[in-house]
Every structure is written in C-alpha cells, then in structure tokens.
Amino acid sequence: MWQEINYTEDPSNLLVPNITYKINPAEIESIEANSIAEEIGFESGDSIISINGKKPRDLIDYQILISEEILDISVLDKNHEIHNINIEKDQDVNLGINFKDALFDSIKQCNNRCPFCFIDQQPSGKRKSLYIKDDDYRLSFLYGSYLTLTNLKKEDWERIAMQKLSPLFISVHATDPATREKLLKNKKAGVILDQISWFEKNAIQIHAQIVVCPDINDGDILEKSILELAEFYKKTSQTVLSVAIVPVGLTKFRPENDGLKSISTEYAKKTIKHVESIQAFLQSTLGTRFCWLADEWYLIAGTNLPSYITYENMPQESNGVGTIRKFLETLKEKTKNLPKKVKKPKNVSWIVGKLVYEALIPTVKKLNLIDGLKVNLYGLPSVYWGQDQVVTGLLTGEDLIYGLKNKDLGEAVYIPSIMLKINTDLFLDDKNIQEVENQINTKIRVLDDSNDIINTLIG
C-alpha cells in the first residue's frame, strides 16, 4: 500500500548513514585535463571507496560529498592497493573525475508487466544491457529516464525529499486508478495522484508522459488524465511541469494476444485534433499548452509538425517532443547560405528512419543544388522490428543491410550516433559497423550530432 511520507530536510545529514547493503567502489573511467584529480594522480581504472568516511551509492551522493572543502578519500587503485588521500579545495570546485557508471550499487528495475514495454518486445539472445528494465529514480533525476514509482521503498521516498531530487520524469499513462493498474498490471499503480500530491507537498517537480494505447487509455480517459495532471500546475507552484503524449510502439516480437492495437494514420489525426483542443483550453486557463504530442503523431498522420514557437521552452525534447521540429529549424538556418559548389566532389548517402524521410526531402533538394555534391536520402523501414514507419534511432544493422541492398550509396554512408549503443559501434541488433560495411560494401561515417550533417557535407 502507498504510505505518504513527508520529510523535513536536515541540511547537516543529506546522506543515509550506516548503509548495510553492498556498494561497489566507484570505478573511474576518465580524468579531465588540468583538474585536481589529474594533478593528484588519479587514473582511469582507479576506484573511490569512500569520501569522508561515507560510501557514495551513486553519482548524486558523490556530488554532495565532494562539495566539502576538505576531503579524505579512500581509493582502490588498479593493483588493488588502497590509498588514503587528503584534498583541500574550494567548496564549488569539481575534482574532474568521470565514472564508468552513474550507480555504484545496483539499478532499481521495474516490477510492472506493461504489455507495451519495449524491453519485452525484443528478440532473445542479444546483449544483456538491452533487457534491463530501468525504473530507477536516480537515473530519472540524472538523465531524464522515465519511472513508474511502483517499486519505491520508504527510504527511497525519504531520499527524494531529503536530497531534493527534482525534477523527476514519471510514466503516468493514466490517472484513473483502474486503467493505470490495467496498463501496468500492478495493483500498486493506482495511487499515482496521491504520489503526485506528495511531490507537491515536498516541492519536487515532475515531467509526465502518457503512452497512448488505443481503446485503453485514450479518448475521455486521456483527457481526464491531462486535466487532472494540470491541476498540479498552479500560479503559486508548479509540480507537474509538462506532459508528453506518446504513441504506443509495437514490434513483431511482442507477445500474442496482448490486447494492443497499432496507431493508424486516421487514429493519429483524430488524436492530434483531440489533444490540440485540450492544448487550446489549457493555454487560455493556465497560460501554457502544458501537454504536447510526440513528433511521431504528426509523422504517422502525414501532417505538418507544429511551428517551433508552440513548443514553448521544449520541456519534453528528450522524449521526442519537438525534436524533429528543432532539427528542421537548425537545418533551415544552416542551409540559408550554402556555397554554389564544393571543393571536392562528393556522392554520399544519408540514412534515416522512414518516419522522418518526407520531412528531410526539402533540405536534401537544397543540398543537391550545390555543384559537385550529390546526397542520396534513404528513409528505411525496419524489417528487424517489423515496423514500416520507424524513427531513425531504432534502425538496426540488419535494417541497413536489407534496406540499402542494390542502392546507389556513393563513397560513404552517413548515420547519426543515436543508432548505436553509447560509445560503441554496436547497433540495437548487436551487429557492429564493420559487419554492416562488409555487407553494403561502403564505408559508414557516424555523426555525433545530426546537425553536423551540413558541415560535414559542405566541408
């Protein structure tokens, strides 16, 4: 059962004392140049055991602990020898240490059984990290990942309030208790409004998301959810800062008879009309649209994306809300003053998901007016996931091999880094770049930022 915990902050004790469960030493991945850590001699592979006698559970604890002016740090080096180091520094100065992982204990995994969970819609036998059901409030605070709140213990709620971990990103899906319990298949899921009330009392802000599943949490239930969340956006205090409305994504690997329906073009148009009417109402009553549709709705519907200004301060950009509109605005700006010709002729290919293909055609037409430059834009479906309309980040190595067969690829293929596991050359299907290059007989160039495509093409 949900129990309300209202915590009064004690600024002298922001860390839970006497932790009994296992906390691994925090392994260092890299050291920043000209930093205190570099000066002292910290190296990649070293690990921090404790700071001023306390073991940091994660990056949050670490940042709090190093805010002291005098630090006694216990370090385990690469040879498994322990060193005790004393550091005196200004309070607001960082040490310049980057860690291999953000969590030094263990990740809090999901205890729900949502039928639309992407983790469960994957084939077996791939790398282990693809099957981790992250539902950890610390990663939500640090990186904006979404959590459901169903797995939190009393000490977790206390820590959120004590360390003011705000904002958090919450998967609401429905405020109606029975509907949310049905979606998450969890009897603990129906108290979401009580939990948001707790956030309000403890001055913790949140961004919410609703994954729309046709005939389950759409229509009147969707409207009720948005409006009930909007009650937590007041002139005096804003607890719920924004709501993202996301279409359910289904793959060919999902369980049979899951009761889910895919999003059709007509359904997308209907949902857009409905949500935009709610936006207009909230704009007039709250002074903000408050809720936004993910870009996919407009792409599936085949309608134009809203203007850039309608996204206000882009509160849900990391959740695919306004991301493509912002990208298109950047491309528009970068292609205002293009050269008439390039110094060295180029014939290359730009690979995107089929869902965004149409939106990028105008940009490619402008680029192809440059003398000596030929850009082949390919919008690929995903044979791997069984999705015709797919976003770029979900394309796999298999999709590139299948989709680019017998195509004019030119001298190189350009892909954005969002197709790959962070800091690796692995696609979502565990194929690596070399394997794909061998199959398509063309070099692959990875762009860290999709906006780099223009600078790269015109030199």
Image (spheres, grey):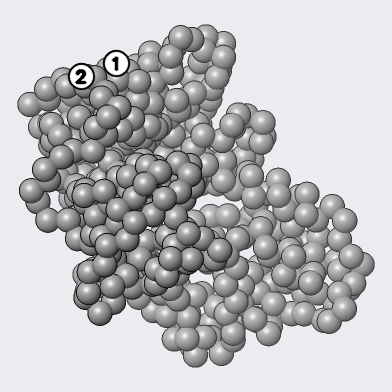
Q: Amino acid at mark 2?
A: Asn
Disc 1 secondary structure class:
helix
Find residue 32 and name its label. none
> Is residue 302 shown above or below 237?
below
Residue 144 in sight in this render: no
Eyeballing the image, is 17 above or below 399?
A: above
- Give me the residue at 42% from left, 80% from top: 432
* Amino acid carrying mark 1 in the image: Lys
Q: Is residue 191 visible?
A: yes
> Dot 2, crowdedness within 10 Å: few (<14), some or many (≥20)?
some
Across the whole image, how many numbered discs are drawn on residues?
2
> Could you tell me residue 423's position as x and y percent?
45, 69
The percent coordinates of residue 100 (x first, y second) are 35, 64
| Rendered residue at 59%/85% (across/down) | 443
Q: Earlier in the sequence, mark 2 or mark 1?
A: 2
Q: Quadrant of the C terminus?
A: bottom right
Q: The N terminus is located in which quarter?
A: top left
- Corner quadrant of residue 48: bottom left
Reply above or below: 243 against 239. Answer: below
Viewer-proximal residue among 395 and 165: 165
Asked whether the residues under the numbered discs 2 and 1 touch, taking CB atoms below 8 Å apart as contact, a structural biologist would say: yes
Closer to the camera, 267 or 54? 54
Q: Residues within 10 Å of mark 1 (few under 14, many from 20)?
A: some
Q: Which residue is mark 1?
A: 201
- Eyeballing the image, is 295 above or below 237? below
- What residue is pinned by disc 2? 6
Q: Between residues 230 and 35, which one lies in front from this camera angle?
A: 35
Residue 25, image quadrant: bottom left
Question: Helix, strand, or loop for circle 2?
Answer: loop
Q: Residue at x 34, y 56 (%)?
A: 86
Classify residue 402 as left or right of residue 384.
right
